[in-house]
Image (spheres, rainbow, N blue to C red):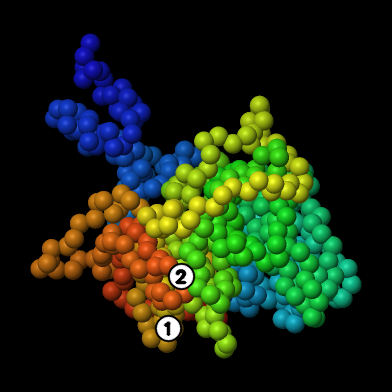
């Protein structure tokens, strides 16, 4: 029997085992029959388009393949052309404390309690943007303690992790605790054998604590930083990794005070921490020997008297395991971009310079060694020893040795900043910092290499049919102002851009994989699909 004599259903299953590029470039050229089979097969079309869209199929979804394909095509068209299918106003009827997050369709805002308290958030409010759309009261989470900050792992674990401190007088010793809850119920998490985890004891002399928290798989990474208070020297910063299911501390990384302000997971067992003092990105892996430094990537060299005041980062979504039943597909964590926001200061009075740069998580993963001994024979992560010292740090790779071809830098002086939730998958959203005074367009940049390759310039005399003005950027650009760095900072990561024709007066814009959230501070939260 010849290959093409096989039943069509069997041919489809065989072709689904091929990479999408092979299906398009080779299989369609064999003969007309195979070409038509590919064009008419929803599973094959979906297989190809998920890859090119940078998304992963969610096998837990109940949606049939043909429906998934239609949803995916509509989504891609909407993002590329700035097509707004729905606009919803979400009233916020509680005073916000400043804590927030937006992920997996859930928007969380801290509730302001005593504004004079060191940690004025007694509760969190959240709404599911995919379901509630402003029609239901915001759900409330409270554990009888003030919340310093929180982290989410919704799709993977239905988990919200709260870092808490006692209410009331903070002049004495207080215990900082980690509280693990099911977001859907507000109860202690059913998979946590120890849902309340002791973290540390502090007094006012320790300084004000800030928290950065991320959850991937069984690992919960926690960065605690302390700001000087009452003229006293602040406590040392600490970076810990816990197994949240068991409540056990896996490893601690010794840190220099204020060297780190954030981190991202590259995989479940690999993390990246930007180091302000050393001016580099540090990649570590979790192993039975603790956090092992694998690669250090230098940032561009600052000019004399220039100081990095802030360096924050985010990559959305995080690497995850199982998905919930919805949605039918999710952005690929490996292909997602990481966003780094940098504030550089110089002079007296202080002059502030704001920069952002984008790099794919997959590009950073290439700097990991081929194999790292992070798993035991059963496949579960080994609990690491505490406080592993970095005895032989790796040599740093210079900025010009790694950065220019795989990053894209922007001067973000003129865009609304202060929010880090401005990327999802391979897209980045921004708006002018003056939009609240002078209405401005929303800008979406897509760093998907397939979007770049598929981009076609509109005909010169073509009548505009898109709600956005599209363009392609493939040339290297030079970061301004040049005097901030000792070297010219070139970057060349290509991207497509769509600028909305309509202008908006939002204070800031956030995004997740399905929507843009426009903020009118203390008024409404407009929502686009």
Nearer to the camera, 301 or 338:
301
CA distance separating discs 1 and 2: 30 Å
- The percent position of residue 141, horizontal first and vertical second, equals 69, 63
Which one is in front in this view, the residue at disc 1 or the one at disc 2?
A: 2
* 415 versus 516 height, above or below: below
Nearer to the camera, 492 or 215:
492
Q: Is residue 337 left or right of residue 458?
A: right
On residue 434, the disc is 1
Nearer to the camera, 404 or 142:
404
- The percent position of residue 352, horizontal first and vertical second, equals 52, 80
Q: Residue furthest right?
A: 172
Q: Is residue 387 left or right of residue 480?
A: right
- The percent position of residue 298, horizontal first and vertical second, equals 52, 58
Q: Which residue is mark 2?
A: 486
* 445 versus 121 height, above or below: above
* 121 versus 22 height, above or below: below
Residue 236 can be seen in this image? yes
């Amino acid at each position: 029997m010849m290959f093409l004599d096989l039943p069509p259903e069997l041919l489809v299953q065989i072709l689904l085992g091929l990479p999408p590029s092979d299906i398009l470039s080779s299989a369609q050229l064999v003969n007309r029959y195979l070409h038509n089979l590919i064009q008419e097969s929803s599973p094959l079309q979906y297989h190809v388009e998920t890859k090119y869209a940078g998304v992963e199929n969610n096998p837990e979804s109940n949606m049939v393949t043909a429906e998934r394909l239609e949803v995916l095509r509509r989504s891609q068209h909407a993002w590329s052309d700035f097509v707004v299918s729905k606009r919803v106003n979400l009233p916020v009827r509680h005073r916000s404390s400043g804590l927030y997050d937006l992920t997996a369709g859930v928007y969380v805002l801290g509730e302001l309690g005593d504004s004079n308290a060191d940690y004025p958030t007694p509760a969190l409010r959240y709404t599911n943007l995919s379901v509630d759309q402003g029609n239901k009261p915001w759900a409330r989470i409270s554990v009888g303690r003030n919340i310093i900050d929180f982290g989410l792992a919704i799709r993977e674990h239905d988990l919200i992790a709260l870092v808490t401190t006692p209410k009331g007088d903070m002049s004495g010793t207080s215990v900082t605790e980690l509280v693990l809850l099911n977001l859907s119920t507000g109860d202690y998490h059913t998979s946590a054998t120890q849902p309340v985890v002791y973290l540390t004891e502090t007094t006012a002399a320790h300084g004000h604590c800030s928290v950065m928290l991320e959850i991937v798989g069984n690992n919960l990474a926690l960065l605690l930083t302390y700001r000087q208070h009452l003229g006293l020297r602040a406590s040392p910063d600490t970076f810990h990794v816990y197994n949240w299911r068991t409540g056990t501390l896996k490893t601690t990384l010794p840190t220099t005070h204020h060297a780190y302000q954030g981190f991202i997971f590259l995989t479940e067992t690999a993390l990246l921490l930007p180091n302000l003092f050393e001016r580099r990105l540090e990649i570590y892996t979790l192993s039975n020997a603790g956090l092992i430094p694998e690669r250090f990537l230098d940032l561009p060299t600052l000019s004399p008297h220039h100081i990095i005041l802030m360096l924050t980062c985010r990559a959305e979504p995080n690497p995850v395991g199982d998905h919930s039943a919805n949605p039918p597909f999710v952005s690929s964590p490996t292909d997602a971009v990481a966003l780094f926001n940098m504030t550089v200061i110089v002079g007296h009075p202080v002059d502030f310079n704001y920069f952002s740069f984008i790099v794919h998580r997959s590009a950073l993963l290439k700097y990991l060694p081929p194999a790292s001994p992070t798993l035991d024979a059963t496949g579960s992560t080994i609990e690491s020893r505490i406080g592993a010292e970095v005895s032989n740090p790796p040599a740093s790779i210079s900025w010009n040795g790694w950065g220019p071809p795989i990053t894209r830098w922007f001067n973000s002086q003129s865009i609304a900043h202060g929010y880090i939730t401005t990327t999802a998958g391979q897209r980045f959203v921004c708006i002018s910092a003056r939009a609240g005074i002078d209405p401005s367009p929303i800008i979406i940049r897509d760093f998907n290499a397939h979007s770049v390759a598929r981009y076609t310039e509109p005909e010169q005399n073509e009548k505009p049919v898109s709600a956005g003005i599209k363009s392609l950027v493939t040339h290297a650009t030079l970061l301004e102002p040049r005097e901030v760095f000792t070297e010219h900072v070139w970057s060349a990561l290509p991207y497509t851009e769509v600028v909305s024709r309509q202008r908006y007066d939002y204070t800031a814009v956030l995004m997740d994989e399905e929507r843009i959230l426009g903020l009118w501070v203390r008024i409404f939260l407009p929502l686009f699909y």
